[in-house]
Amino acid sequence: MTHSMWRSTLCQDAHVYPSQPQPPVAQPPAPPNMPAYPAYRPRPRSRTPIGNRGPWWAQALVSAAIGGFFYVVICTLLVIVAEFGSRDWWRVGVWTLMALFFVGVLAVWARSTPQRILGPGAALVFLGLQRVLDVLWAVGGPRLYRDFSHDTIALWSNTANGLAIFGVVVGWSVARRRTAFALIGVIPALALSAAGVWVEGAVNYPESLITTWLLNGTVYVGFCVLGILSVWACDGIGLAIRRGRTQSRPRPAYPQPGF
């Protein structure tokens, strides 16, 4: 057997044909196209105003703490102002800063963004009128005593005190209310403001200066709280009415799946 015949026999036995292309070599599967790991996103900040966060009892505790803070500050300032004199610009400046501080607290503790504007705005109107009367009194105090009667001076003082109580009640209530029904509470709040002015003038104050101004501050803050509670009660009635309407509303009939 020649060399060529021997080569042909080997190729046939091995089933390999030189003219036929070789089969491709199996490649490992390509890794799946995995997306890139998402970048860490910080937790979005809550857009809910501070005054509307947390359960109702937590909000009530914070409101009570704010009221207690103002009670302590007002009583302390009443004693300090009485010690340094009651008819000078220092007294006017102290109570003006106190009113502005209260307006700022309302802007922070309001329930919604519109109430952050309406509540402090309402308080600023009535407290601003009270501060105008106080400034006029500081400017023309001796002349007022000489040119006006006792009844006119009493009316001036009572109007200023009533504006102070009503301004606190209206500003706080507008900033914290939840329903329009709370506006009805403005009527008893107005009556309580007048009652607070009458009580302030009718109380027989003791001779002790500190006790006198502590009692005066207690009457003022107490009637502010009573006015706020009257609006709060009307707001609670409005919430009950809204809840009753929601529960009595018929539910839509959903189509049942066929069997």
Image (cartoon, rainbow, N blue to C red):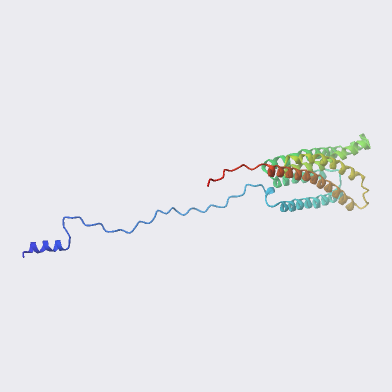
| Front-lying residue, 19 or 81 | 19
Q: Is residue 123 visible?
A: no
Q: Is residue 101 left or right of residue 148?
A: left
**Residue drawn at (89%, 45%), measured in percent from left and top?**
199
**Residue drawn at (79%, 46%), measured in percent from left and top?**
229
| Front-lying residue, 15 or 140 | 15
Q: Is residue 52 visible?
A: yes
Q: Is residue 90 left or right of residue 27?
A: right
Taking the view exactly as shown, the residue that stands out farthest to the bottom is 1
Taking the view exactly as shown, the residue that stands out farthest to the left is 1
Quadrant that contains the N terminus: bottom left
Q: Position of residue 64 (x, y in %)?
A: 77, 52
| Front-lying residue, 259 or 128 | 259
| Front-lying residue, 128 or 169 | 169
**Residue drawn at (89%, 53%), measured in percent from left and top?**
211
Q: Is residue 140 left or right of residue 236?
A: right
Q: Position of residue 257 (x, y in %)?
A: 54, 46
Q: How many marks?
A: 0
Q: Position of residue 62 (x, y in %)?
A: 73, 52
Q: Residue 137 occupies which quadrant of the picture?
A: top right
